[in-house]
Image (cartoon, grey):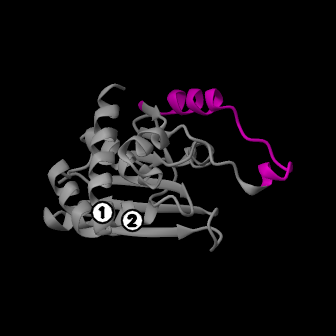
Amino acid sequence: MDTKRLIIVAVGGQGNLLASRVLGEAALMQDIPVRMSEIHGMAQRGGVVESSIVFGDADSTIISDGEADVFVSFEPSEALRALGRCNKETVTITSLSPLPPFTVAIGKGEYPEIETVTSLLAEKTKRLIAFDATKLAEEAGNVLSVNMVLLGALIQTGILPLTADAIREAITTKTKKAFVDMNLKAFDLGFAEAEKH
């Protein structure tokens, strides 16, 4: 099978690692070779967290600059920061809900305009799916389900060799029972949103 390379970037506490585990579990259910690695920023909530996931036969989890087939960002400025991982054929998915870093909060930094972020992403990649994932997570019943909303959008693209049913099953087994229904709804809302872009 073709190797597919996925980069996910988020701010600590947004659920990037859970999203990665759900993808890995779904790949194992479908007998798809999968390799993952993670880079954690500051240990406390708020640092950058990046996951690299390679589906298919590959010797390494390293995804060099310009090698991502698909790129998912939980936060718009993080999408901009990691844009170098993409190329002209990369499909990019980003939430448009900003989570400004501490430096912006104390007046030592400036948050980029959302329009600047989306125009740069659209210019540098093949397809951009950009929407307010936080709004859909709230609609699903849990603002923390942004990760599941973005997983839905990711699976809708059809780039990864994973089925929506395998992801739903992995969500059921990998997330806390109290959140399963909300997470499944969030996944479906993200899937439907990506169809519009």
The percent coordinates of residue 183 (x first, y second) are 32, 54
> From mark 2 to mark 1, how far is it between C-alphas?
6 Å
Q: Residue at x 42, y 52 (%)?
A: 142
The amino acid pointed to by label 2 is: Leu
Residue 22, quarter of picture: bottom left
Q: Pointer 2: what residue?
A: 18
Q: Is residue 177 or residue 163 the one in the foreground?
A: 177
What amino acid type should be assigned to the residue bearing mark 1? Answer: Val
Q: Is residue 120 visible?
A: yes
Residue 31 position within the rendered picture, expressed as x and y whole percent measured from the top left: 13, 66
In the image, is residue 116 part of the stretch drawn in magenta?
A: yes
Q: Quadrant of residue 114?
A: top right
Residue at image location 34% in from the left, 67% down from the top: 21
Residue 87 is situated, as x and y percent measured from the top left of the image, at 47, 40
Q: Secondary structure at mark 1?
A: helix
Image marks 2 and 1: residues in contact by CB distance under 8 Å = yes
Magenta extent: 103-127
Query: Relative to residue 158, is residue 193 drawn left or right?
Result: right
**Residue 24 location (% of width, % of height):** 28, 65
